[in-house]
């Protein structure tokens, strides 16, 4: 998809938010990508999922997996487009795991998807889970790569939107010296 079209959609449905945010990585930023808002609108989430699926259409994907929370709906939509199975990973006592009877088999082609990546922590955890099964990692599909391509997962990678959103170490955040309150909008407890 054209970057300007994606940005227009994201602004229209308030995926892009401005303020003072505590990211899952523990860093602070003046911009937050609330991709959960994307999935309120099936017509837009279908377009985004189609873009990711198109990038991996020739990779014979058997299973699409995403980390909970951000990757659940996305993995379903991408799997539907690729005619593949859909599963998700989730945290149990803070550790990413595969539960609910979900499985991957040696030799299967796995696509990992995630809504937003800043440092890639959750995706790296899912990569390790997939490796443990002996399945093949075909690639990583992202809605937003906030690192502007700096995070490299070591596999084929496709992001619908690649952008650089500045983030700060919590101890060096210039926004903290203003009266803008710090918000934690994500689903995970930030790293310490």
Image: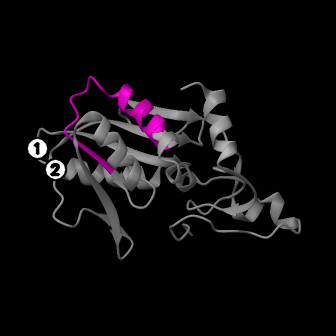
Report whether 17 appears left or right of 159: right
Q: Position of residue 20 (x, y in %)?
A: 76, 61
Residue at (11, 38) in percent of width and height:
107
Report which residue position mark 1 lands on: 106
Task: Give the labeled residue for mark 2.
Answer: 104
Q: Position of residue 144 (x, y in %)?
A: 54, 41
Q: Nearer the viewer, mark 2 or mark 1?
A: 2
- Helix, strand or loop for disc 1: loop
Question: Residue at left 41%, top 33%?
Answer: 50
Give residue 189's position: percent from left, percent from top: 53, 71
Query: Which mark is on residue 31?
Result: none
Specify start and end residues of the magenta stretch as a single range: 45-65
- Between residue 69 and residue 23, name the one nearer to us: 69
C-alpha distance separating marks 2 and 1: 7 Å
SS for tag 2?
Answer: loop
Q: Nearer the viewer, residue 165 or 77?
A: 77
In the displayed structure image, the side of residue 117 where residue 62 appears, left or right: left
In the rendered structure, does residue 57 fall within the stretch colored magenta?
yes
Q: Is residue 146 left or right of residue 95?
A: right
Residue 3 higher or lower than 152, as above or below: above
Report crowding for label 2: few under 14, some 14 to 19, many 20 or more residues within 10 A (C-alpha). Answer: many
In the image, is residue 157 above or below residue 22? Answer: above
Q: Is residue 93 left or right of residue 147?
A: left
The quadrant holding residue 57 is: top left
Q: Quick check: is 51 in the magenta stretch?
A: yes
In depth, the one of 55 and 45 nearer the eye is 45
The image's colour scheme reads one colour
Residue 153 shows in this picture: no
């Amino acid at each position: 998809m054209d970057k300007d079209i994606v940005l227009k959609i994201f602004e229209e449905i308030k995926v892009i938010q401005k303020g003072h945010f505590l990211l899952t990585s523990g860093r602070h930023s003046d911009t937050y990508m609330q991709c959960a808002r994307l999935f309120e609108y099936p017509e837009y989430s279908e377009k985004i999922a189609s873009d990711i699926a198109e990038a991996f259409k020739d990779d014979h994907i058997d299973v699409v997996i995403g980390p909970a929370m951000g990757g659940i709906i996305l993995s379903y939509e991408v799997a539907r487009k690729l005619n593949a199975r859909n599963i998700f990973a989730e945290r149990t006592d803070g550790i990413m795991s595969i539960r609910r009877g979900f499985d991957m088999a040696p030799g299967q082609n796995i696509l990992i998807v995630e809504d937003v990546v800043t440092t890639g922590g959750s995706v790296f955890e899912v990569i390790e889970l997939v490796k443990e099964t002996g399945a093949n990692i075909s690639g990583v599909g992202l809605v937003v790569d906030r690192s502007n391509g700096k995070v490299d997962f070591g596999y084929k990678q496709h992001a619908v939107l690649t952008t650089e959103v500045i983030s700060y170490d919590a101890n060096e955040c210039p926004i903290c010296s203003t009266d803008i309150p710090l918000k934690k909008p994500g689903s995970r407890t930030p790293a310490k």
